[in-house]
Amino acid sequence: MLTLTLGNYRVRLAESLADLHATQKLRFLTFRKGRDGAIPAKGLDQDRFDEQCDHVMIEHRKTGQLQCSFRMLTFESGREVPMSYSAQFYDLSALQDFQGPMVEIGRFCIHPSAKDPDVLRVAWGALTKLVDERGIELLFGCSSFQGTDAKPYSDAFAILRDRHLAPKRWLPKVKAPRVFDYAERVKRTIDRKSGMRLMPPLLKTYLLMGGWVSDHAVIDRQLNTMHLFTGVEINAIPPARKRLLRALVATHA
């Protein structure tokens, strides 16, 4: 059972329908607000994968407010990857040869009012504990850029193209009807400082862990995002980062 505290935060798995609705409400606030910033009336982001997932909740210890949530769907090996959320958008046939346990991370969101960078650190501490407990060998999911216009993110896409593409043996193929093939289309000179500044925080963290991405972004007009398939092989995480994360868990579990 997941239990973790760090400073002002506690981490736990959703245990009730009320807990699940709290995560779905935060997801709705994060992903489905109108382009003018307005929040539509329904208030819950739901799909058919919710019933199969563990839902991780990071709450403020004093107020109880949900600061961050994400869901996890665990698979015994790559043979099961066609049942993942990501497989709706990417041809993941190459990953079916992956032999070890894997987990899909989805609907990762942080409350708009949460400005403390420790929230993301706590989330990675929780992931570290779950990965170790379950013997996970691959983390994967979708990392999103806000909006569907790729031009402002050209420097970020150029960095991904040059340094972080998936190994050929795992590279996802195009499946979605609307994609931006940035590996072919981005030609501009790279401003690395600008590119890293524009990189979504979650994706940036994945990359620091040795993560890799698909060579194309899926354009999701419903959520007003462009997302990339993202993978992190646990054995490839730099040893120093593994030690830091495990020290965090050992100190605060």
Image (tube, grey):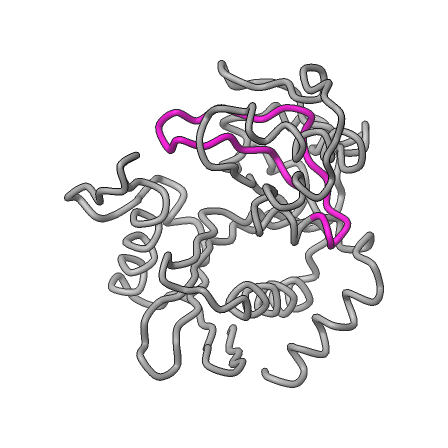
When the figure is inspected, residue 153 is found, relative to residue 58, above or below; the finding is: above
Q: Which of the image's four quarters has the C terminus?
A: bottom right
Position of residue 96 measured from the top left corner of the image (x, y, whole percent)? 69, 33
Position of residue 223 measured from the top left corner of the image (x, y, whole percent)? 37, 33
Residue at the left extreme?
Answer: 41
> Which residue shows up at 72% across the image and 21% down it?
188
Residue at the right extreme?
Answer: 239
Front-most of residues 218 and 250: 218
When the figure is inspected, residue 176 is found, relative to residue 13, above or below; the finding is: above
Q: In the rendered view, does 62 fall on the left or right side of 204?
A: left
> Which residue shows up at 54% across the image and 30% down it?
87
Magenta segment includes 94: no
Q: How many marks?
A: 0
> Which residue shows up at 39% across the image and 81% down it?
61
Position of residue 50 measured from the top left corner of the image (x, y, whole percent)? 38, 48
> Which residue shows up at 42% across the image and 66% down it?
57
Residue 217 occupies quadrant: top right
Position of residue 242 measured from the top left corner of the image (x, y, whole percent)? 77, 66
Q: In the rendered view, does 28 fall on the left or right side of 70?
A: left
Magenta segment includes 215: yes
Residue 221 occupies quadrant: top left
Q: In the rendered view, does 85 fall on the left or right side of 46?
A: right
Magenta stretch bounds = 207-230
